[in-house]
Image (cartoon, rainbow, N blue to C red):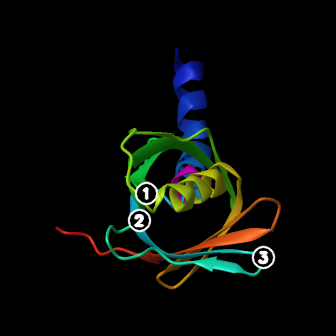
């Protein structure tokens, strides 16, 4: 019994060093963003302003938000500056004039490759570097 306890106590410093690394691994957790623009090639799309296009990363690996028309949800993983998102699911409302843009935005999320944080700006690179989603941090309502 004494050997087991000594072994456990000897491992505590190692385990305490692992916890901070895990917490830092997902720098996007618990952040909220508003889309400023989607850039792909020479095309730049900015939301019309009728509806804020948002993205919220939750600590449990889920992401949710509002597209130009529908609400959406997905799961994500972060490793360093690599960002992967699973297939995006959304509500199924139809909104005239924005469905093409909504499809482009949701496909871009599914094709996320990496991200960069600069101050209050989040840039998500997608489609093997062919495009960038540019977000601005939203302030907490608390």
Q: What element carries label 1?
A: loop
In space, the residues marked 2 and 1 are separated at their CA atoms by: 5 Å
Residue 4, numbered circle: none
Q: Residue 111's x, y, as percent?
A: 70, 52
Residue 53, numbered circle: 2
Horizontal side, residue 54 vs residue 16: left or right = left
State which tag comes first along the sequence, 1 or 3: 3
- Callout 1: few (<14), some (14-19), or many (20+) C-alpha neighbours within 10 Å? many
**As drawn, which residue projects farthest toward the top?**
1
Q: What element carries label 3?
A: loop
Read off the magenta span.
20-24
Residue closer to the observer: 96 or 71:
96
Dominant SS of magenta comes to helix
Q: Are marks 2 and 1 in contact (CB under 8 Å)?
A: yes
Residue 47 visible at all: yes
Q: Residue 142's image quarter?
A: bottom left
Q: Is residue 98 above or below residue 42?
A: above
Q: What element carries label 2?
A: loop
**As drawn, which residue projects farthest toward the front?**
96
Horizontal side, residue 110 vs residue 36: left or right = right
- Callout 2: few (<14), some (14-19), or many (20+) C-alpha neighbours within 10 Å? many
Q: Residue 61's x, y, as percent?
A: 50, 43
- Callout 3: few (<14), some (14-19), or many (20+) C-alpha neighbours within 10 Å? few
Q: Residue at x 46, y 82 (%)?
A: 120
Count of labels in the image: 3
Q: Name the residue under label 3.
A: 41
């Amino acid at each position: 019994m004494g050997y087991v306890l000594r072994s456990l106590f000897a491992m505590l410093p190692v385990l305490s060093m692992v916890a901070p690394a895990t917490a830092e691994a997902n720098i996007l957790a618990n952040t909220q963003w508003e889309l400023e623009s989607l850039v792909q090639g020479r095309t730049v799309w900015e939301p019309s302003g009728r509806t804020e296009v948002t993205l919220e990363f939750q600590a449990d690996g889920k992401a949710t938000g509002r597209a130009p028309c529908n609400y959406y949800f997905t799961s994500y993983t972060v490793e360093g500056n690599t960002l992967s998102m699973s297939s995006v699911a959304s509500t199924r409302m139809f909104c005239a004039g924005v469905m093409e843009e909504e499809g482009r935005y949701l496909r871009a999320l599914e094709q996320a490759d990496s991200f960069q944080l600069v101050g209050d700006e989040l840039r998500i690179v997608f489609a093997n570097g062919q495009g960038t989603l540019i977000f601005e941090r939203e302030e907490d309502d608390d």
